[in-house]
Image: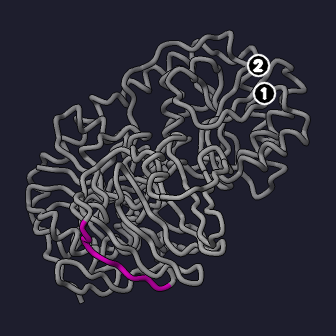
Amino acid sequence: MTVYHINKAIGWASSGVEYAQKYRSLALHSTGTEQRFIFTDYLGTNLIHFTTLLGLETNEIIGIYAFLAQQQNHPSSYPIESFEKRLNSSFSKKEMLQNQLIYTIPNANISYRVWLIDQQFVDRIDILYNQKSIRVEHYSDRLTNIEYFGNNQLISRTFYTEQGAVAYRQFYENRQITLTFIDNKILIGRNAFFQLFFQRLKWNSEDIVLLDRSHELVDAVFPQLNGARVGIIIHAEHYNASYSSPSRILWNNFYEYVFTHDEYVTWYIPATIQQAKTMKEHFIKMNKDASKIHTIPVGCVDKVNGTMDIRNKYNLVTVSRLATEKHIDLLVKAVVAAKKQFPEVTLSIYGEGGCSTSLQQLISKLNAENYIFLKGHQEMTHEYKKYGGYITASYSEGFGLTLLEAISYGIPIVGFHVPYGNTEFVQEGINGFLVKKTDSEEKNIFNLTAGLVKMLYPHFDLTQAIAYNQEKAAKYTVENIGKRWDQLFSDITTKEGLHEYISS
């Protein structure tokens, strides 16, 4: 049996989906399960660079484009000196950014923009004619593919084998796949290309396919299952509450296809009991088989990491992508307000993302540089020990991986009373506080501030919070979560009654 985890992309600022895959990898490794992680998006940077940063095993990674080119997984190690030798003429070099170099040739209209990995290895080379991109070369430890452009629009890509021969060519319109020429075949569109890939994996009834992202993928997956069992991982709210009614549920569009075609799905796997309960009610209402819904947390911890230092109670922390939907600006304003009552309070914000600049500007505007800090992306293993309170302003969390990490260190939590992660991990007044979310940003800041004040007041029993967190986190160890996956996969009754996919 092999478990195949299917995702689309991965990048510098991984989302909760990618971290969920990382934790699932650890859980399944604990049971000795063979597994592969499939990524279907074309990435301009070497896929292995990102999966290594996340902590996935290189020998378990499959990228569609590299797989069909019969490429092996290699770390980025093509030296900049090898590129310079290719120029065969005098050139000038200018460092533009930390990982970017510009090469120009005297009396020529051609220039080269070289993007580096770790400031020493070539990631990609943009070939520019009169400052317009005409070709982009991509590398691991060797050339993997070349992109061709016309009028700044992507026209085609050529992918190469390990030995440097052409493996296949692909053509695009508006960056969408139109034609693929591979192995004497002409494939039309995205679906045909993806189906060829899934076909070559040669799944059978012993295999398991877990879809972390299914939108615009599953129509190519279902026809190639050959009896493999399918699990749909639910990472977000599964329905649109605003447009649902007592008689009809409007599904989240990212899950609509797999809910509608439930006859091909073995399991739907939400991360919390609360969401599973809601899903079952909705499935029954929509005449779906609710027995396919099984709860398995998307996160796990190696161990319960001990007792937080009570002396750090005023040092607050939050960890997330710096994205608009995380509402970190509300946290900044709430901490500024709480500072008036508790002068010792500080906030450290870990993570990277598009809101980094605006958050730094907000911190400066509020004159909070001395006690609110952007820490960037860091390995958090040794960081959590420095803090005594975790705060979150997210309006919705499918699970909340960092909440689990926080309680494993005994840290109490303040956040909104919203589904599903916050209510999964916070027992009101015991290990933190959940405050009401409203439609008013000003009111939400006020409520968060009130929650922080409650947690920071001396009468909040930190000893009780730590004990509760340790007991709660112990249920989420790698070993315990691994056993839950193993139990699900071992249920032979789920191998029966699957339908053959018939494409229209």
Residue 227 vertical position relative to residue 368 in the rendered view, above or below? below
Q: Position of residue 40 (x, y in %)?
A: 35, 64
Where residue 204 sits, quadrant-wise, is bottom left
What mark, if any, has residue 499 been given in the picture?
A: none
Dot 1, crowdedness within 10 Å: few (<14), some or many (≥20)?
many
Please say whether residue 478 is one of the residues in the magenta stretch: no
Q: Secondary structure at mark 2?
A: loop
Q: Which residues are magenta?
A: 165-173
Hey, what amino acid is under mark 2?
Tyr
Image vertical order of residue 142 relative to residue 132, above or below: above
> On residue 457, which mark appears?
2
Quarter residue 455 falls in: top right
Q: Disc 2, disc 1: CB below 8 Å?
A: yes
Query: How many C-alpha atoms fall within 10 Å of the one at disc 2: few (<14), some, or many (≥20)?
Result: few
* Residue 428 versus residue 188 in the image, above or below: above
- Tag 1: amino acid: Val
> Does residue 291 show up?
no
